[in-house]
Image (cartoon, grey):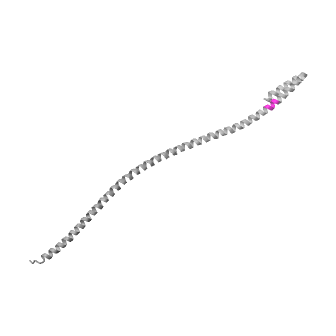
Amino acid sequence: MWMPSKVCVMFVCLWAWHRPGFSVVADEVRKLAELSSKSASEIDLVTLALAKKSAAVEQSIEKGHQSIKTIDESRKRMRTVLTQTFSLAAASDDGVDTITLAVNEQKAVAEQIAKNIEHIAQMIEANYSSIAETSQAAQQLRTLAADTEAAVGWFKI
C-alpha cells in the first residue's frame, strides 16, 4: 500500500517543481503518504498479531476437538462398562432368585424331615412303652412259671 503512495508523492513533487504553488499540495500529499505508510505498518502489526492469536485460537479449538473426542471415547467405554454391570446385576438377581427357591425347597424338606423325626420319636416312645409292658409281662410270666413249677413240683410222675 505504501508503494502507490510514494509514486503519488513523487508525481506531486514533480508538479510542485514545475508549478511553485503546488508545493503546499505536495507537502500535504507527502504527509498523507507518510501517514498512510505508518497506518499500513500498524495494520501489518495488527494483522500479524491477529494471525498469532488466530493460530492460538486454532490450537485451542483443536485441543477442544481432542477433548471432545476423548470424552466421547470415555462415554462409550463407560456405556460398555455400565451395560456389562447391568447384565451382571441381572444375572446376580437371577442367581439370588434361584438361591431363594432352593432355600425355600430345603426349608420345606427340613420341615418334613423334622415332622418325620417327631413321628419316629413318637414311635420310639410307643415301642418303649410296648417293651416296658412286654418286659413286665415277661416278668409276670416268669413269676407264673416259677409258681407253676413249684405247684407242679409236688406232683410226681
- Residue 152 located within the stretch drawn in magenta: no
Q: Residue furthest right?
A: 20
The quarter in which the N terminus is drawn is top right
11 displayed left or right of 60: right
In the rendered image, residue 38 lying in the magenta stretch gets the answer: yes
Q: Which residues are magenta?
A: 35-39
- Which of these two is toward me, 112 or 37? 112
Q: On the image, which quarter does residue 38 sit in? A: top right
Q: Position of residue 55 (x, y in %)?
A: 69, 38
User: Looking at this view, is 151 or 38 the one in front?
Assistant: 151
Quarter of the rendering occupied by the C terminus? bottom left
Q: Residue at x 47, y 47 (%)?
A: 89
Residue at the outermost left position: 157
Dominant SS in magenta: helix
Nearer to the camera, 103 or 42 = 103
Location of residue 84 with respect to 114 vertically, above or below: above
Q: Is residue 138 left or right of residue 28?
A: left
Image coordinates of residue 153 in percent, x first then y, are 13, 77
* Image position, residue 37 (x, y; %): 81, 31
Q: Is residue 49 above or below residue 29?
A: below
Q: Quadrant of residue 70?
A: top right
Figure check: 56 above or below 117: above
